[in-house]
Structures are given as C-alpha cells and as structure tokens.
Amino acid sequence: MQAMVLSANAPIESSPLKLEQSHDPQPGPHEVRIRVRCCAICRTDLHVIEGDLPPQRQPLIPGHQVVGVVDQLGPECRRLKIGQRVGIAWLRKTCGVCKFCTAGRENLCESSQFTGYHADGGYAEFAVVHEDFAYELPDVFDDVRATPLLCAGLIGYRALKRSELPRGGTLALYGFGSSAHVVIQIAQHRGSEVYVVTRGEKHRELARRMGAAWVGASAQDMPVKADAAIIFAPAGELVPPALESLEKGGTLALAGIYMTPLPQMDYERYVFYERNIHSVTANTRDDGRELLAEAALVPIRPHITEYPLQDANRALQDLKADKIDGTGVLIVDGA
C-alpha cells in the first residue's frame, strides 16, 4: 500500500512525511482492516510529527480521523462485516478492567493507546483497528464530511460536556478551527448563543457566516460574560482572559492535548466566585456514539478543504499557518 510515513520528528515546514510503499497490514484477533477512503488532518497530528508529544514509535503513519470500508476480518470478529463503512478515531485501545474503564471513564485509562501515535493511522490506503473501537457512521454524512467528526467533533463534544454549558446559556469559543466549527453548530442547535474569539480574519469571517452572536480578536471586547467557555487554541496565555470573561460559577474547558504553559494568575481576579477550569483528555466511546447521533440530528455541516494523500505535508503546513477554514481532509481512495 501507499502511505505517508514519518521517520523522524521535524518541523512540518521541512515536509517530514514521505510517500512510501508499505506492506498491507493484516488484522489480528478481533481486528478489522479498513480500505481507507479519506482521513482528516488535525493539530494533534502536528504535535505528533513535530515532537511536541513524546515519540512512541517510528517509522509511523499518522492520522486518526479515518473513514473507509471494512475489507478484511481478523479471527473472532463478531460485530462488523465486510463492506461496512466505519470510522477510526484517536482512542484505539484501553485495558477495560482498571478503575477508570469500569467507571465509564476509559479516556483516563493509563494503558490507553492512540491511532496515529502508538499505532499506524489513516494517512495510508489501509488501516487496522479492533472492531470494538470502530464507529458505525450515520448515512447522512458522506465519507469526506464524516471524517472531522472522528476527532474534531469528538474532542469538541467532550469539551462541550466538560464546559457544563447550561441549556440556552452563552458559550465563548477561543480559536475557531475544526473542533470549534463543529461545536458552534451543536451549541446553536441546543439554543445557545456563541461568542468567538480568534486572531485570524478568515476564521472570524467563517464564524460570522455560521451565525456567531459576536466575533472578535480579544476576549476583553466581548459584550457579555459567558456562562461557559472552551479554549481550542494551544495557547496557555488565553486562560486568564478567558476566565476573566466568564460569569460567576462558569466553567472553562481546555480542549487541547498540548498547551503552552499557563501564566501565573491572581486568584481573586481570575478564579474566585467558583469559576472552574476543566481539562479535556481524549474521549470515551460513549462520547463518540452520542456525538454521531446528535450530529446526524442537527445535522452538522462541516466545512472541508480537500487534499490528495501525497500532499499531506502541504495540508499540515496550511493547518499550522491557519489557512484552512474548517477541516482539511486527505483523499485516499475515491471518496
């Protein structure tokens, strides 16, 4: 199979992914092989490629928002069938027996493994996953528009839950990339007004087109205090102004897998009055199933920019430079 392979961490500007011919993967017990149709790109891919996250294996095929069709079953598969369309997401394995797994908090399992990080992902013609960690996809989404739901959507959904946004409350979003442009649609469907703070004019224009109640470049300019907020940008310096722009008793969710250091903060100014800070760590499979069901009801309409698989470096360079509105998607096989 053809795949975009990372052999050593390096800045994405140096185009470290190389198009190579690799062996077709074979599914093990309870695993299925997917013929990949498309795979969305993600800032987490950048963190993996550039070494912000500690390397787990190399060479590595990145990518964890994968849509394709089951083309081979490993031994003892029971749930999925040949020809079934499924998605592969970031979370690919947990122990199933620890105190977190048995309490419905498998996203905190200390034995967790992740697609495109511990194991090869979807920047390739084939990918393998345990059938219990593959998602059946609603028919309302075509292949390309299903991909952002598998990480941008999942993390956005988890962050929205962690923000404890009350029904009909006001929500502030910091950064307006792939996750935020999914979350705004869910929040609006639930009756909330959404306020967007983002530095890029193209992102501000997209937020306006998507019906944000207010859009600006600085939290200090927001006309109201938000009941809940989510920071998607990996910038720790956004935490103090986001907290200061929260209503009393509000919650700020930090959605990134990686964030620059948080600055020292004055307790009374930023945290007092029961303002909460909740981090977000991956997602559970229940989150995934809930998100896909709600996304189909809305229905979510992702904004997509398509790239051929061999242009993965360029796509990620565009992502890093904030040139993509919505989500970039690599087209692998006839999507």
Image (cartoon, rainbow, N blue to C red):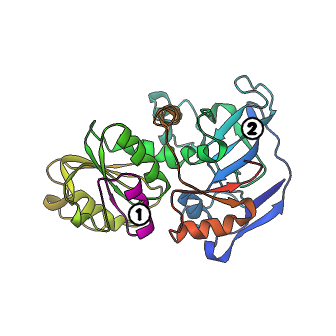
| Point 41% across, 41% down: residue | 186
Residue range corresponding to the magenta coloring:
195-214
| Point 74% across, 34% down: residue | 31
Q: Amino acid at mark 2?
A: Val
Callout 1 crowding tier (Cα within 10 Å): few <14, some 14–19, many ≥20 = some
* 226 drawn magenta: no
Q: Which residue is mark 2?
A: 69
Considering only vertical position in the picture, is 220 above or below 93?
Answer: below
Left or right: residue 25 versus residue 80 is right
Indicate the position of residue 75 as horizontal and vertical percent values.
81, 28
Closer mark to the observer between disc 1 and disc 2:
1
Considering only vertical position in the picture, is 80 above or below 287?
Answer: above
Name the foreground residue: 186 vs 44.
186
Name the foreground residue: 270 vs 87.
87
Q: Which residue is mark 1?
A: 205
Which element type, helix, strand or loop, lies under badge 1? Answer: helix
Q: Amino acid at mark 1?
A: Glu
- Regarding residue 54, the answer to whether it shows in the image is no
Quarter residue 203 falls in: bottom left
